[in-house]
Amino acid sequence: MSTFLVESLCTPVNMNLLGEAFQRIKSSFEKHCPETDEEIERAMLKYPYPKGFKLPKGSDVNTIEELFSTKQLAQLAYLKYLIKREKEVAVRETLLLDLLHSYKSVAYVKI
């Protein structure tokens, strides 16, 4: 994990390629995002998501699954799948780093 963070933060990223990738992913996500119970169930089986990921001490819950509804987990898993399909390594890792940051940010939110 720490190697991924350091490499992602230190690797230069072509901002044009990053912007194009973002738009491509956003478009696919908006068109095919799991919404119905059937789509959510299929997505949960098809796309991996962080199971058993322990959250920092002081969080309201113990694992990441407890932070999100099944629908949200399915949508996050689908988003990660779309990001991982990107061919440009620096772009893919930058987008994954942003996704990881969003997971961690939610972990600190007190409801």
Image (cartoon, grey):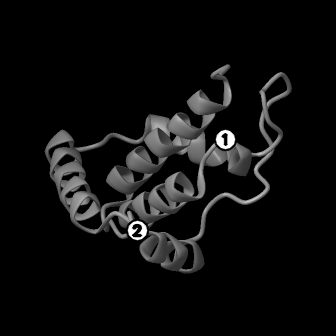
* Side of 35 relative to 55 (left or right): left
Q: Position of residue 35 (x, y in %)?
A: 38, 63
What type is the residue that disc 1 sits on? Answer: Leu
Q: Identify whether 89 is placed above or below 67.
A: below
* Tags 1 and 2 touching, CB below 8 Å: no
* Side of 73 relative to 16 (left or right): right
Of badges 1 and 2, the one in the foreground is 2
Q: Observer-nearest residue: 86 or 34?
A: 34
What type is the residue that disc 2 sits on? Answer: Thr
The quadrant in which residue 5 appears is top right
Q: CA distance from mark 1 to mark 2?
A: 20 Å
* Side of 54 relative to 39 (left or right): right
The quadrant in which residue 58 appears is top right
Q: Position of residue 107 (x, y in %)?
A: 67, 31
Point 76% across, 50% down: residue: 53
Q: Observer-nearest residue: 111 or 58?
A: 111
Point 20% across, 40% down: residue: 15
Point 41% across, 42% down: residue: 11
* Side of 46 relative to 59 (left or right): left
Residue located beneath label 1 in the image: 67
Q: Position of residue 20 (x, y in %)?
A: 15, 52
Q: Identify whether 18 is placed above or below 71.
A: above
Residue located beneath label 2 in the image: 36
Secondary element at tag 1: loop
